[in-house]
Image (cartoon, helix red, strand yellow):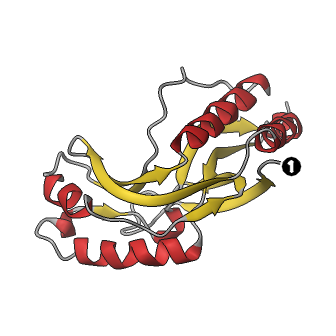
Amino acid sequence: MSSRRSQRLFAAVLPPPAAADELARTVAALRELPGAAGLRWTARAGWHYTLAFLGNVDEELLPDLYTRLERAARRTPSFPLRIHGGGRFGGRALWAGAAGGLDTLRLLAERSHAAARRAGVPMEEHRRYTPHLTLARSREPADLAPFAEALGGFEGMHWEVGELSLVRSDLPVDGVPGEQPRYEVVRAWTLGR
């Protein structure tokens, strides 16, 4: 009996180091707010805009997936983006938003989702894409309003998104305090070529 190997993957846009530096300074201030100690803060290495979550992908699907994601990248022009403002998903997740070429970002998300589906990856129903970069999570419902409010005026630097990345995430070991998922870019494709 052969065992299938799979990888937990997602397609993403990664902010450049300078944009992440700006956000890191703001997040440091957020971590001083009352209630911050009860949140699980996302490590900087985990800051990304997920375009399509693929879940566990059988390795036999990867060659076709790579081809289709490359095509999606080639068909999508580079576009301006910046980290902008923030929000929350209920009392469970705090995030930073985006501004700039959001129509193109949404198009890239749709194309990434379609590429995975056509490559045979079982995908959940595609919902309208909400660009967000997760900063913190809470196991129990928490009052994230003050954090989202503090992020409201954040205006990050402009940058040109020029790449679609396929990222592998390795989940943290259960029971290890402070353990974070590990992320590795498996492949990246230049936009518009």
Residue 101 or residue 19, whichever sits in front: 101
- Place residue 29 in its image quadrant: bottom left
Residue at 59% x, 70% y: name it.
16
- Report the side of 28 relative to 142 (left or right): right
Task: Kindly state the secondary structure of the residue where label 1 is placed.
Answer: loop
- Place residue 36 in its image quadrant: bottom left
Residue 25 position within the rendered picture, expressed as x and y whole percent measured from the top left: 35, 79
The residue labelled by disc 1 is 193
Q: Amino acid at mark 1?
A: Arg
- Label 1 CA crowd tier, 10 Å (few <14, some 14–19, many 20+): few
Residue 2 position within the rendered picture, expressed as x and y whole percent measured from the top left: 85, 34
Q: What quarter of the picture does the N terminus occupy?
A: top right
Residue 120 or residue 157, whichever sits in front: 157
* Res 39 seen here: yes
Residue at 79% x, 38% y: name it.
75
- Report the side of 13 relative to 129 (left or right): right
Vertical order, 147 against 77 (above or below): below
